[in-house]
């Protein structure tokens, strides 16, 4: 097993900006950056099919990017010089590539078939993964069939997942994405925010005797989740007549921390475990997906895992020039570091994927929002772009104006499906027509000449010109299924990995969220204190605390 030190040395002995391909890309950007997509397409009639890649039923059209064959070659060289191959192997081997936490990064083991062997500290973790999956399946079947009864003998109709960050965003996204496949006579709710409104609204119409809470927290110490879990406990006890024994039938836990689960009062027999080598934002296919499994059933959940696994294998084995996550990741690097783009918009033209952008925000930004390299040096290049988005066509009537005519360059990922799960007249054709129209408009725009030819008054012409030359990828899949969702998520997971490898950062820690958590713990008693607390913050924070205390007493 490679040591942290060896991993530090492995990728590239040279800092990123000193790599050969980096310098060549800088030069390439000088020429390519000045060329319009109109010209690139006019010069090569085959461009629209040449810059495409297809794997596992996902068609990636990246022809509407501001690249030439040379750019692509150089980006692929950069990946090689950055040691991407070695780092992929290191991850799949179970090396401790999360060096600041000295942990393996093995979400790929969560979807590995039973027959595989993946070692962490000399132990094969795959049998443990399948043991938990089997336990989850048994539990889900009992809930779904009504065999599992609540304390008063009623069947469970409502499932409330309590968690935050990776213990919420993945589950809620997957539930929404796969609603079509879910058990429709059950209700699924997700409580994450410590704002009491989130809990209050989630249970407002629920009956405690028919409700199961899944407390999902890797650490089982997260302030928001534990506050919500205690509130849920009180609410359930009230509705169940105050009998402490009722908790066993209405609370289960998903965690890596058995001691804290027991302390909370949940029998560890009703706990579903996972491991420190699963990062929170990479955990939706671990036991953290328990609510998803209850919703869609064990078979569909396993189909989703198969989808993840197929993409893992594609990422691990496909040549980089045909490797979807590698291509997507390198394009993000191209715009971030050479064009100075600050964001990437992810635009799913699929209503079921409405929470996909929110899910991606944690995946991408908690992973690659880093400013030091693996060996602790401050980077002299940009890292993690801001990922954001909304489903189409809604976004078109909101922020697309800025993407089309604003002053910023915003690369976009459009995601669409060939078949809809809800066939309703011409809806789907209209939806997909908009995908094609948007990417076309972004790339080619509308020239001054064209605008004038329409008889537009001279003074209005500049307002109506679309410069175009705005890049996009289009991901076209057949149907939204558990399997295709798994592929899509793994595609982005590995794109993030590719980016992080080039930037030589630790994509698997999240130290940046710690300081705020610690400060909040100090301020909570100051806000709640009955007597005037002695405040030792800065003058702004002190004043805000005093004003809040006055407001709440008024
Ligand atoms: O906010 C940081 C974070 O640690 C995320 O990485 C994680 O997904 C989330 O909090 C929730 O953590 P836990 O599952 O331990 O409650």
Image (cartoon, rainbow, N blue to C red):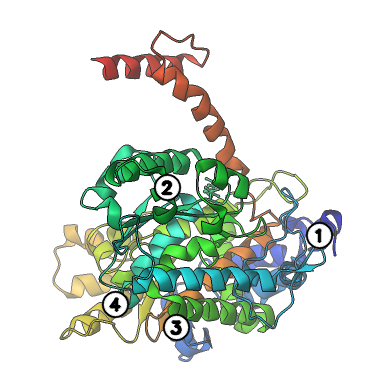
Residue at numbered disc 4: 437
- State the image quarter where residue 350 is shown: bottom left
Instruction: Give the mark nearest the N terminus, 2 or 1.
Output: 1
Q: Residue 393, how many percent across, how many down?
A: 25, 69
- The secondary structure type at the circle numbered 4 is helix
Instruction: Give the mark nearest the N terminus, 3 or 2.
Output: 3
Q: For this rendering, which residue is in front, 88 or 225?
A: 225
Closer to us: mark 3 or mark 2?
2
CA gap between label 3 and label 2 equals: 69 Å
Is 548 situated left or right of 366 in this image? Answer: left
Residue at numbered disc 3: 41
Instruction: Give the mark nearest the N terminus, 2 or 4.
Output: 2
Up-down: is 554 above or below 371? above
- Residue at the location (58% across, 47% down)? 219
Residue at numbered disc 1: 7
Instruction: Give the mark nearest the N terminus, 3 or 4.
Output: 3
CA gap between label 3 and label 1 equals: 42 Å
């Amino acid at each position: 097993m490679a040591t942290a030190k060896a991993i530090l040395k492995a990728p590239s002995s040279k800092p990123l900006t000193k790599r050969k391909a980096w310098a060549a890309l800088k030069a390439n950007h000088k020429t390519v950056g000045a060329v319009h997509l109109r010209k690139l397409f006019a010069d090569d009639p085959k461009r629209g099919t040449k810059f495409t890649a297809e794997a596992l039923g996902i068609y990636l059209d990246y022809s509407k990017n501001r690249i030439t064959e040379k750019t692509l070659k150089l980006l692929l060289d950069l990946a090689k010089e950055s040691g991407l191959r070695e780092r992929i192997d290191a991850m799949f081997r179970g090396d401790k590539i999360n060096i600041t936490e000295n942990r393996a990064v093995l979400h790929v083991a969560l979807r590995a078939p039973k027959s595989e062997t993946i070692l962490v500290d000399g132990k094969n973790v795959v049998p443990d993964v399948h043991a938990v999956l089997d336990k989850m399946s048994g539990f889900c079947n009992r809930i779904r069939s009504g065999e599992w009864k609540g304390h008063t003998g009623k069947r469970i109709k409502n499932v409330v997942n309590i968690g935050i960050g990776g213990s919420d965003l993945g589950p809620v996204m997957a539930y929404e994405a796969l609603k079509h496949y879910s058990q429709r006579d059950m209700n699924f709710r997700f409580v994450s925010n410590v704002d009491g409104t989130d809990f209050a609204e989630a249970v407002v119409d629920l009956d405690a005797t028919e409700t199961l809470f899944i407390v999902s927290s890797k650490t089982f110490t997260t302030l928001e989740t534990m506050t919500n879990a205690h509130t849920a406990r009180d609410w359930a006890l009230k509705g169940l007549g105050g009998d402490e024994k009722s908790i066993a039938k209405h609370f289960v836990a998903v965690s890596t921390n058995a001691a804290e689960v027991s302390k909370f009062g949940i029998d560890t027999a009703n706990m579903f475990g996972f491991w420190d080598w699963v990062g929170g934002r990479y955990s939706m296919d671990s036991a953290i997906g328990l609510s998803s499994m209850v919703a869609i059933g064990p078979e569909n959940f396993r189909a989703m895992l198969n989808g993840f696994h197929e993409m893992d294998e594609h990422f691990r084995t496909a040549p980089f020039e045909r490797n979807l996550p590698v291509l997507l990741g390198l394009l993000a690097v191209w715009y971030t570091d050479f064009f100075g783009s600050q964001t990437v918009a992810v635009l799913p033209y699929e209503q079921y994927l409405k929470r996909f952008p929110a899910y991606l925000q944690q995946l991408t930004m908690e992973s690659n929002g880093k400013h030091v390299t693996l060996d602790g040096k401050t980077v002299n290049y940009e890292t993690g772009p801001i990922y954001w988005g909304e489903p189409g066509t809604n976004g078109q009537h909101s922020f697309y104006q800025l993407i089309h005519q604003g002053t910023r360059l915003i690369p976009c990922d459009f995601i669409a499906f060939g078949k809809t799960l809800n066939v309703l007249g011409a809806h789907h054709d209209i939806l997909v027509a908009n995908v094609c129209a948007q990417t076309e408009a972004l790339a080619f725009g509308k020239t001054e000449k064209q605008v004038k030819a329409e008889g537009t008054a001279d003074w209005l012409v500049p307002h109506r010109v679309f410069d175009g030359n705005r890049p996009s990828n289009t991901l076209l899949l057949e149907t939204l299924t558990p399997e295709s969702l798994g592929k899509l998520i793994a595609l982005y997971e590995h794109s993030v990995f590719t980016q992080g490898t080039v930037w030589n950062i630790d994509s698997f820690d999240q130290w940046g969220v710690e300081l705020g958590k610690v400060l909040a713990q100090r301020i909570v008693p100051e806000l709640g204190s009955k007597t005037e607390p002695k405040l030792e913050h800065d003058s702004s924070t002190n004043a805000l605390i005093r004003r809040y205390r006055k407001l709440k007493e008024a």
